[in-house]
Amino acid sequence: MKSLNFKVLFSLLMLIPFVVVTAQVNNDEVLMTIAGKKIHVKDFMAIYQKNNVKGETIDKKSLDEYLDLFINFKLKVKQAEELGLDTVSTFVNELAGYRDQLAQPYLTDAATMDRLVAEAYERGKADIRASHIYFRLKADATPADTLAAYTKALKVRERIANGESFEKLAIEFSEDPSAKDRDANQQHPFIKGNRGDLGYFTVFDMVYPFETGAYSLEETKVSAPIRSEYGYHIIKVTVRRPALGKVTVAHIFMAIPKSATAQDSSRIQKRIDSVYAKLSAGASFEDLVKVYSDDKGSAAKGGVLPKFGVNRMVPEFIDAISGLKNPGDYSKPILTPYGWHIVKLEKRDEPVTQEELTADLKKRIKNDSRFQLVKNATLNRIRAEYGVTEFPEAKADFYTVVTDSIFVGKWDVNLAKDLTKPIFKIGNMTFRQKDFAESLAAKQRKRDKENIQVYVDKMYSEYLDESLLKWENAHLEIKYPEFKALMTEYRDGILLFDLTDQKVWSKAVKDTTGLKEFYAKNKGSYIWDARVDASVYTLKDPKALQKVKNFIQSGLADKDILKEVNADSAKILTIESSKFSRKDNKIVDSVAWTPGFSKELHIDGATVFVNIRKVLKPEPKALNEAKGLITADYQNALEKDWIKTLRAKYPVVVNKEVLAKIK
């Protein structure tokens, strides 16, 4: 669903004002009554001033015109309500969807979001290469398991502080499988471990707690144990430097097979060195790519690889690119786990400002774990505003009624049928144990088995948070008049669009009888100016001129003339036939409008003449010749008749004294 539906845009365009209101008027005064409903000055002015053309002075005539538009708008909405269009499921669902969108800014802590945007932008200015030692721990681990993992991590951190090798301890203790060497088997060859090295990354490449831990470290420093949703990490930053950003490079690649011997590797190295020598001597990079590169996919494109960021390539490749300053610069041969490369810089994306990047950063934050910080700030504000009273003993009752069946989606909510006590209060609203029980039942699914108490506590916190947000959401129209006004705009706009479609747009298209009758009554409004029935002949070979004229005089049709003249050669003749009005065709306009052949013209090396078959006097256009224009006029007529009917049906009373104050 788009952020601004065409239906709503249509309603706003219908009410674009012509002037700016400068007089002071009491907002609570009644400006008019439409079908018994009072319209206060503030209701009228809210829409009026929202789209005003700033800088213009008051104009009574324009204000009266705008007032008429406003009244027509409200009359149409009134009829839509009487017809029950505001109760149709499609309307209700569409409006609910827009409300969800419009409510989001009110349910998002702006200060926290702005802080995270600024933080992400600053972090994005640097690339980090880091290693870690990982201690696995489930997100829902018990306090005892958490303490055990933390203690283990802390002891390893102490050994690093005492001078032991980070890489050695990563091989020994890290539960990240990539840290250790993996022997060859039927599934894969021997794989050398990375000793904890994660390569380069930048903002959003890692889970937020890990990212924060890494960016808070200076180069070569080691962190204390840092908790993420996956467990504990000890992080060591090995390189920190200005961000590479997005780059496009080309490479000449020579693969080293997994089965290569030392002699094979030496031979491949000598080969890449000889290619580098040819490049240094002036040979074309693209030519060398075609002959020598083992990356056949990129070789067909001059060695160019798709644009990438710092986290998409192995560190050796990134290090080589970082040393290239200008497009066209290329590296010395570099060795990666895949083979030898010579890398050429094609393009480096220019840095963008925080303002330019803000929308994208907000989108990424909303899809990232760090958005929980925004939610927490919002929840804390709601808690402080309304007050929350919790009853821990009521939550504890669930420790005995929730069973392991909930982890296979088969927990029976009737096990909690005797639980009726309050479990928490938000403001003056009490939520009871049965409400929480129903939430537990609705959310149960097949999942890994957990400690019941840990699971209940987690689901209770989730239920409380959801209830806080729903409570705030339900009070938005009361708390924020501008939100209420915006929802009214959307509601009325959708109703207006739907009813106008029924009464005017679709009706004009479907009502063929009505359209024909309208055309018959107004045929005199759709008149062709003087025209000629003619053909324009363009010949690349002037020798064929007389032949073409002979064919025309013999009565041969244009399509047959084309076949005859163009039969034995390339297209030397083209013909444009139509009924031409003035300004339809420059060539037709340039000749005398008399029946017969025109004088010959010489245009861009071609010989051109016009055959005017008939001069047509002004005449009414047929319905199919001006159907678009006639349909549009029919729609306007339908709308005028509709408004006339509405004005007669619903009484409209304007308070002229209040209107005079506005004027």
Image (cartoon, rainbow, N blue to C red):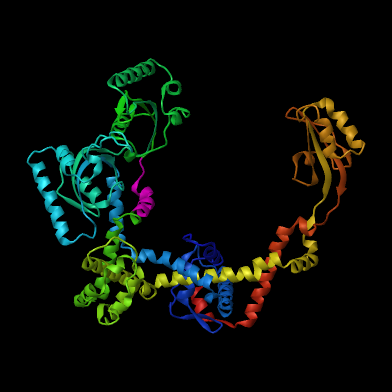
Q: Look at the image and say whether residue 479 sits in the magenta stretch.
A: no
In terms of depth relative to the viewer, which is nearer, 109 or 585?
109
Q: Is residue 262 above or below residue 12?
A: above
Q: Position of residue 424 (x, y in %)?
A: 25, 77
**Residue 119 seen by the camera:** yes
Residue 405, position as x, y percentages in the image: 30, 68
Q: Residue at x 32, y 40 (%)?
A: 311
Give the extent of the magenta segment.
351-364
| Residue sitting at x 78%, y 68% | 517
Front-lying residue, 366 or 405: 405
- 442 vs 353: above or below: below
> How many labels were placed on the picture?
0
Q: Main secondary structure of the magenta part?
A: helix
Given residues 185 and 46, the one toward you in this image is 185
Residue that sits furthest to the bottom in the current view: 36
Give percent across and percent down for residue 175: 21, 46
> Which residue of the protein is positioned furthest toward the left in this rendering?
162
Judge left or right: residue 135 versus residue 202: left
In the image, residue 492 lies at what x, y percent? 52, 72
Decide which of 301, 46 is in the foreground and name it.
301
Q: Quadrant of residue 571?
A: top right
